[in-house]
Image (cartoon, rainbow, N blue to C red):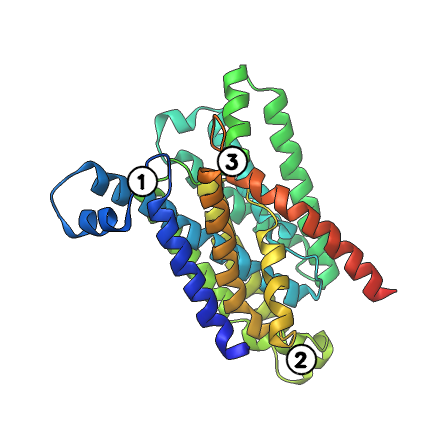
């Protein structure tokens, strides 16, 4: 199953990607998509695919991939099955940065102010968490991340409470619910490089994570630089997840769910789960985004809301499963 898992996940992504190009308020046939891509002359179908659906598809793959990958790395690094990217403050920091851009009106002056501020907020949040836990171990890092996330969440609540008008509060809440709608190639160009660099840093931790499964002291005795591994994981999470959250808003549970779906098929090896977790995360986000377009309703359901509605029961099951396993 180990050798077949990645090809199977890749095939699933191809199917979901095809569905993402076809589905929407205006359905397109496979022949129409092929003709639009082959014909360079401007047309409604070509414009719809290249400027609306294709950027949305690319962002879904990038965002889901980095969320799944970072979740697998953090669960291996912290040796905690409940760890996920938001644990270190990257998601909350990005959300706070974006809210600041919306609250003070920077988004009205500069088109990409929200994602830029979100990225800066994520880097600042993880940097503060790392500074607070610089001389501590894994527990200190977790506590520092929780503290930073709490402060960032308080800042978001304060901005909502002090919003100058209902429209500003609505704009903030809409962004916080997470979505891939109305995203363009500008968003891909802004987030893509940071997500790719972050993913590269996270993949460098694969061998060290297998050794860390034995414990930090045992890993160090095998020649693993635990501090370097921790820095790679934090930097990769800050860059990748920060950029993803900055352009899509908060999308939870993907980083928690994806590693648990593939780990039992890989012999519970943390390092071996990284690439399958990334592919699974991409499939989850792409499938959820496709579902938001297919579910009936007057308005399109927000991606973050749908993922949370599915992820919350899974999280509850996971907590109960962990409790039974430890009993």
SS label for mark 3 = loop
Determine contact: label 2, label 3, CB under 8 Å: no
Residue 233 % position (x, y): 56, 63
Establish if 116 lies above or below 105. below
Q: Is residue 80 above or below residue 243?
A: below
The residue depicted at 61 percent of the width and 43 percent of the height is 308
The relative height of residue 221 versus residue 252 in the rendered view (above or below) is below
Numbered label attached to residue 220:
2
Per the model, the C-alpha gap separating discs 2 and 3 is: 45 Å
Res 235 label: none
For label 3, the residue is: 302
Tell me if residue 150 comes above or below residue 39 in the rendering: above
Label 3 packing within 10 angstroms: few (<14), some (14-19), many (20+)? many
The label nearer to you, 1 versus 2, is 1
Q: Which residue is mark 1?
A: 52
Please report whichever mark, 1 or 2, sits nearer to the chain's N-terminal start.
1
Outermost residue, left side: 41
Crowdedness near tag 2: few (<14), some (14–19) or many (≥20) residues, C-alpha within 10 Å: some
């Amino acid at each position: 199953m180990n050798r077949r898992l990645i090809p199977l996940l890749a095939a699933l992504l191809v199917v979901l990607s095809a569905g993402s190009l076809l589905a929407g308020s205006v359905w397109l046939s496979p022949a129409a998509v092929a003709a639009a891509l082959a014909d360079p002359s401007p047309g409604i179908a070509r414009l719809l695919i290249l400027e609306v659906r294709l950027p949305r598809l690319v962002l879904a793959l990038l965002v889901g991939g980095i969320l799944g990958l970072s979740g697998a790395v953090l669960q291996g690094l912290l040796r905690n099955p409940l760890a996920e990217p938001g644990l270190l403050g990257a998601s909350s920091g990005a959300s706070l940065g974006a809210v600041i851009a919306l609250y003070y009106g920077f988004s009205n002056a500069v088109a990409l102010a929200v994602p830029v501020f979100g990225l800066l907020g994520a880097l600042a949040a993880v940097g503060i968490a790392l500074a607070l836990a610089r001389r501590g171990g894994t527990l200190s890092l977790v506590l520092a991340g929780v503290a930073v996330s709490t402060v960032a969440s308080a800042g978001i609540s304060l901005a909502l409470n002090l919003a100058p008008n209902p429209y500003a509060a609505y704009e903030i809440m809409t962004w916080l619910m997470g979505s891939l709608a109305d995203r363009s190639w500008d968003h891909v160009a802004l987030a893509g490089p940071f997500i790719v660099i972050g993913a590269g840093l996270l993949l460098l931790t694969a061998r060290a994570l297998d050794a860390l499964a034995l414990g930090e002291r045992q890993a160090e005795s095998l020649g693993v630089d635990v501090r370097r591994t921790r820095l790679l994981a934090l930097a990769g999470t800050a860059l990748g997840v920060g950029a993803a959250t900055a352009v899509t808003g908060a999308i939870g549970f993907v980083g928690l769910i994806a590693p648990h779906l593939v780990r039992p098929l890989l012999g519970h090896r943390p390092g071996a789960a990284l690439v399958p977790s990334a592919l699974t995360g991409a499939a989850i986000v792409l499938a959820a985004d496709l579902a938001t377009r297919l579910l009936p309703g007057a308005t399109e359901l927000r991606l973050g809301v749908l993922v949370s509605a599915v992820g919350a029961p899974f999280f509850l099951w996971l907590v109960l499963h962990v409790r039974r396993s430890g009993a």
